[in-house]
Amino acid sequence: MGLRKLDIEGIGMTSQRTRNRLVARLMEKGVRNEAVLQVMSRMPRHLFVDEALASRSYEDTALPIGHGQTISQPYIVARMTELLLEGEKPPCKVLEVGTGSGYQAAILSPLVDRVFTVERVEPLFRSTQELLHALGFRNIHMFLRDGSWGLPQEAPFDAIIATAAPEVAPPALLEQLAVGGRLVIPVGKQSGYQLLQVIVRHSETAYSVVEHEAVQFVPMVNDKP
Ligand code: SAH
């Protein structure tokens, strides 16, 4: 991803007006959290996709970002962020599994203290690292690794968000949640069809699960046996 694209204000299809239309659509679809809507209205999503797709970057759809991966649909980003922030107190330290384009991490950045995000595809990791750095996101910490094992050296997390779907929630992610913390994760055996789950850790040993809408994510790959 070339940094020549760092046109933050945007022109034409990447303008504020286009972003406002997207936010209106998110509200129609039921997104209520004001802080989330505000961050979505400011975030230059066109910078997180390839230049050839920039004109479609404010449509409410997932788009390819290379390496067989996608930037998530804006509605799903908004919905998952809203669910992540729904706890009794706002999360300070958040882990994201599946950095991809960096868009979800960028949306979280102004809403929490620190974002830790892990990606397993090296070229994607490198280009996103360059982009997030150029855009000045200083509270996003990126790691190249298999996120199904979480990030033990930084645990516990107040919240964890997975933007790739495992068949079942990985035990490491459950263990790395702080008590009172929540995991927002698409879960399902079928690629491209999963249910969004919110798993809350109530004590050392007690967790609850609430299922939300059906979503379409790429599978969470598990590199180690
Ligand atoms: N949050 C991203 C969505 C990217 S798609 C965005 O806003 O653009 C999901 C990403 O998860 C892909 O980049 C994929 O490589 C990554 N992924 C899949 N399995 C993973 C794993 N086990 N650990 C880390 N990243 C993983």
Image (cartoon, rainbow, N blue to C red):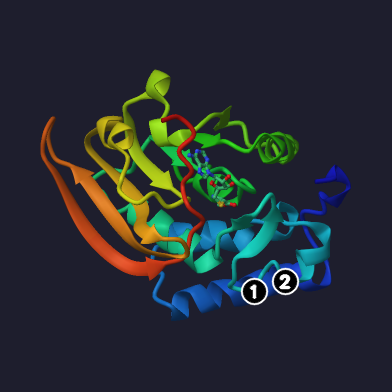
Q: Nearer the viewer, residue 72 or 3?
A: 72
As drawn, the label of residue 93 is none
* Contact check, label 1 and label 2, Cβ < 8 Å: yes
Quarter where residue 172 is shown: top left
Q: Nearer the viewer, residue 146 or 57?
A: 146
- Residue 123, above or below 12: above
Separation (CA) of disc 1 from disc 2: 6 Å
Q: Is residue 113 visible?
A: no
Residue 168: image x %, image y %? 30, 49
Which secondary structure, mark 1? loop
Asked whether, in this view, residue 54 is left or right of residue 65, the answer is: right
Q: State how many labels appear.
A: 2
Query: Which residue is denoted by mark 2 in the rendering?
Result: 56
Crowd rating for badge 1 (residues with CA inside 10 Å; few <14, some 14–19, many 20+): some
- Residue 89, above or below 142: below
Q: Is residue 84 visible?
A: yes
Outermost residue, bottom direction?
28
Crowd rating for badge 2 (residues with CA inside 10 Å; few <14, some 14–19, many 20+): some
**Quadrant holding the C terminus:** top left
Outermost residue, right direction?
4
Residue 144: image x %, image y %? 58, 29
Indicate if the residue with disc 2 has its beta carbon within 8 Å of ligand 1.
no
Q: Residue at x 38, y 35 (%)?
A: 92
Residue 38: image x %, image y %? 53, 60
Q: Residue at x 25, y 62 (%)?
A: 211
Q: Amino acid at mark 1?
A: Glu
Q: Amino acid at mark 2?
A: Arg
Q: Residue at x 57, y 36 (%)?
A: 120
Which secondary structure, mark 2? helix
Asked whether, in this view, residue 121 is left or right of residue 211, the answer is: right
Query: Which residue is denoted by mark 1 in the rendering?
Result: 59
Residue 112: image x %, image y %? 44, 40
